[in-house]
Image (spheres, rainbow, N blue to C red):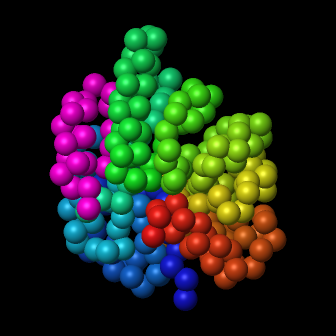
Amino acid sequence: MNWIFDAHIHLSDEEYESDMPFIINCMEKMHIKACSVSENYDTSIKTLELGKKSNLIFSFIGIHPQNSNEDIEQVLELVNSNSEKISGIGEIGLDKTYEDSDGGFQKQKQIFTAQLSLAEKLKKPVSIHSRKALDEIYEIIPSYSIQGMLLHWFDGNKKQLQKAMDLGFFVSFGPVMIYANDKQVLLSNTDRNKILVETDGPVKFSKCFGLKPAQISFIPSVIFCASKVLRVPYNEFCSLLEENSKNFLGI
């Protein structure tokens, strides 16, 4: 039986705190592993602890672009001192919607590049937030040598998707892909060896999910829909996703 991976979920969020024993048990029963990403120093600490509780959880530490005022040195030191315990750096990236000045966006870039440098040094994969900043990220990435690069919740156009493929990015698709035709079109145009799936929980999704906070148990539904879009048998697609996930993580 294949292991399936949630490539991007915030298990350190308070939404999941009281349910973690149930979530881990669910992951064991459903054969699911997860990349748990962080947003700041406090969630990075929580993510590290979650990784210690279960080998099904891959801990990603980092500063989200909405938290560009965080003390970057504190987080970099946390990564350095726990480099053997973490699986990657994230959620990191750029997002113009959080800034109303060029100076603020430049600060995001400084935080982003500092974390990319550390990922390169430690040979860790990165989980990247890229809303309204894909082109800027494409300009920055070639300066670094990082094997596992994920553009989570890819939201660009076809031209930007091809650029992602040319640069060697993985891209992930989540629950919104089940009911959004534009995401299904992007999926169809993605190199199959670069596809990952995610929930981005606890984000809430409309339509068939009734605005409930995303659960890791949504992943089989995402995979089933993607397999239909790509016309690939479910089990065959699970095998592909497992291989892709391991390649992203370098395991």
Residue 134 lies in what quarter of the image?
Answer: top right
Give the quadrant of the C terminus. Answer: bottom left
Question: Residue 132, percent across and down?
Answer: 58, 29
Question: Residue 147, percent across and down?
Answer: 52, 53
Q: Is residue 174 left or right of residue 128?
A: right
Look at the image and give the residue range highlighted in magenta.
61-84
Give the quadrant of the N terminus. Answer: bottom right
Q: Is residue 17 visible?
A: no
The residue lying at 55 percent from left, 83 percent from top is: 2
The residue lying at 41 percent from left, 39 percent from top is: 116
Q: Is residue 122 left or right of residue 249?
A: left
Q: Is residue 54 left or right of residue 204?
A: left
The front one of 218 and 158 is 158
The front one of 170 and 91 is 170
Check the image and name the residue furthest to the right: 231
The answer to whether residue 79 is magenta is yes
Question: Residue 212, percent across and down?
Answer: 47, 56
Residue 161 lies in what quarter of the image?
Answer: top right
The answer to whether residue 16 is magenta is no
Count how many numbered circles sit on residues in the image.
0
Residue 225 lies in what quarter of the image?
Answer: bottom right
**Looking at the picture, does residue 222 appear above or below residue 206?**
below
Question: Residue 235, percent across and down?
Answer: 67, 82
Q: Is residue 28 visible?
A: yes
**Looking at the picture, does residue 163 appear above or below residue 184?**
above
The residue lying at 36 percent from left, 46 percent from top is: 121
The front one of 45 and 184 is 45
The residue lying at 18 percent from left, 37 percent from top is: 74
